[in-house]
Image: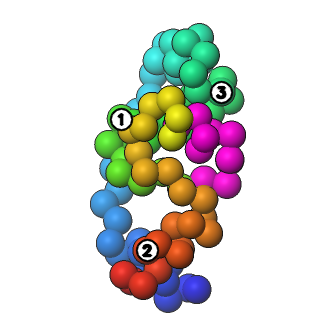
Amino acid sequence: MCGLLARLWQQLQIDFIFVYDQDIQAIAYAGIIPREDAGVYLTAKQGKAQCFVSRNYKLIRVLVEQTQEFECLTPREFLQKYAQKF
């Protein structure tokens, strides 16, 4: 597993994303994304994420059903789909 993670990190492009409090509050107020996940969602959105991986099934379901902005996978689904590429 460690070899897989090392290869995965080598493939990733990592950026610093700053999310403003007022943006988090606006997303939370809109009521689409669960309030406690608004910052996570905005980080992925502003970072132009292509794939969102989380064990938070409620958040994944909301992102898939409501926004459809990212490919949303659980860690197991991610490994099943992408492990052979690394």
Would residue 19 be found to the left or right of residue 75 on screen?
left
Cα distance in 3D space between marks 3 and 1 = 17 Å
Would you name the residue on which mark 1 appears? 46
The mark lying in front, picked from 3 and 1, is: 3
How did the renderer colour the structure?
rainbow
Cα distance in 3D space between marks 1 and 2 = 23 Å
Would residue 83 be found to the left or right of residue 60 on screen?
left
- Image quarter in which the C terminus is found: bottom left
Magenta stretch holds residue 58: yes
| Earlier sequence position, callout 3 versus callout 1 | 3
Residue type at numbered disc 1: Gln
**Residue drawn at point x = 53 percent, y = 74 percent:** 79
Would you name the residue on which mark 2 appears? 82
**Residue drawn at point x = 67 percent, y = 54 percent:** 55
Q: Do the residues bearing badges 3 and 1 touch, measured as CB atoms within 8 Å?
A: no
Would you name the residue on which mark 3 appears? 34
Residue type at numbered disc 3: Pro
**Residue drawn at point x = 50 percent, y = 51 percent:** 72
